[in-house]
Image (cartoon, rainbow, N blue to C red):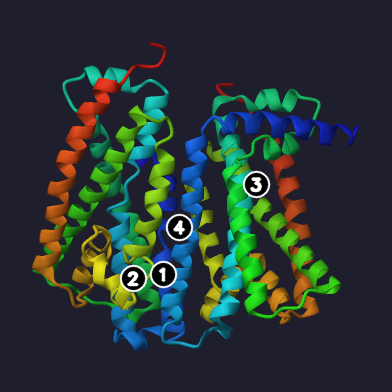
Amino acid sequence: MNLRKYPTVYKKFLHTSLASELEYKTNILIDLITAILSLVGSIFLLSIFFQNNGSIGGWKFEQALIIQAIYTILNGITNTWFNPNLTEIVKHIREGTLDFVLLKPIDSQFFISLKKINPSGFLEIMLGFLLLFFCIKINQINLNLSFLTLSFITISCSICILYSLWFFISTTTIWFVKTWNAIEVLRSFLYVGRFPLNSFSFSLRIFFSVFIPIAFITTIPSEVFLGLSVLWKILLEVIVATVFLITSRKFWLFALKFYSSASS
Amino acid sequence: MLEYRVEIALWAISGIIPFFMLNIWTNNNLNESINISDIMLSRYFLCAFFVRQFSVVWVVFSFEEDSLMGKVSPYLIQPLNPFFRYFAQHIAEQITRFPFALIIAFFFFIFNPESIWIPNLGILLLSLVSTFLSFLIQFLIQSIVACLCFWTEKASSIERLLFIPTLFLSGLLAPVVSFPAYVKSWIYLTPFPYLIDFPANLLSGNETNISGGLSMQILWIFLLFPLFKKIWSEGTKKYTAMGS
């Protein structure tokens, strides 16, 4: 397999999907307003929680804002890449067009995970970074190289876990055909990622770190930002992310054995 | 509808955000500041879950798909407003969802046995009515947005925009009583608190103004219905089927 063709192919994907998405310019504007409002709304909710309390689960308001920032960035990434592509998988399987994807001389997982892009998610990512810089300022975090590497590693791991979760659910379409609702369930669980893990009760904390690793997705990167993180947690996140990536890959290859095209 | 049991079960599960919120509230003793006891708050969020289950609306997504696929044309010829079709679908799915919601409530009571309560019949009926009115308001708002499909192809992004204030202001994530005063001063004039907060307060036995809430719900329906009629007749005049 020639790996060098992948960047070239990806450039083509980017070009075609950007061209088609930019046809709907007002849509992008509406999505931007939606992203801003959604951020304002969750800060509003957070301020309700903090209006009579100094801290929640040991997190101060300024510290909890970091979680919001990271959540917004990750949500932007989900909206830019994961959501448009993985909902497409459902369509491919239902209409039997997955055949064409499988016939192409390119890795099928690469093709279906990166084919489309939704530019309005970029704005959300930028919004998240703006909030993050603001948080770095108000929390007086000094930026140094080791901190930057650690935060880069943890955020990349979060992205990998998030991707694997999405991909895992979309893969189950091969058996269940319609998985919109499973995606909705995932979305509602991910919503929990907006809040520090410590603010939940013990049993839910276990649930969110063992069964659905939402804890790893936002809380650990935020702890890195605050300098609260311990090494074993970061190592654990790297391990979890690797396991998730490998499992999702294996699961996709396994599921393909059961794919029997539409009406056959 | 019964063919899609698993999906509807998943739908019911996807509505459990209020329970996570409840966990944050009680686990950090946030409710002390708003004078609601743990038990009342847990009842509130359970009711919020129920009201949400039976007032959720997705007509804009169905209509957008049908309109992009050109399926609206045959519907328009029929002597019945196509929105009746969607309306019936929503009602049917709500009925199928009922047993799943009961199962979730059952589990909720296993974990929180102290919050079991039986509302009296009058309150139960009133809250059923107000949940239905909340459903009607949301159905009308979404139908108005759906009619925008006649002008723009992707009306669902407008719906996603409108969903944000609904999510944060309706009381699904935090009861409206807990909102800061500068929000409370105007929020009761908007339709949002009547979507979830009012029916949930009513059903859970929390303090609320019953006649005021119901009349506001009816008022909003009377305001929205003519608007829908207007935009529908304008839109159908504008409508050109795919490929014409």
Residue B143 lies, in percent from the top left, at 28, 39
- Looking at the image, tell me whether mark 2 or mark 1 is earlier in sequence order: 1
Disc sitting over residue A37 in the figure = 4
Q: Which residue is mark 1?
A: B19
Which residue is drawn at the image coordinates 46% and 51% (left, top)?
A34
Q: Are marks 2 and 1 on the same chain?
A: yes
| Residue type, numbered disc 1 | Phe
Disc sitting over residue B153 in the figure = none
SS category of the residue bearing label 3? helix
Q: Which residue is mark 3?
A: A167
The quarter of the displayed image where residue B77 is located: top left
A127 relative position to A44: left or right: right
Residue A177 lies, in percent from the top left, at 53, 36
Q: Are marks 4 and 1 on the same chain?
A: no
Estimate the spatial distance between the alpha carbons at disc 4 and disc 3, rounded to whole Å.
28 Å
Q: Quadrant of the N terminus of chain B?
A: top left
Estimate the spatial distance between the alpha carbons at disc 2 and disc 1, rounded to whole Å.
7 Å
| Residue type, numbered disc 3 | Phe
Estimate the spatial distance between the alpha carbons at disc 4 and disc 1, rounded to whole Å.
23 Å
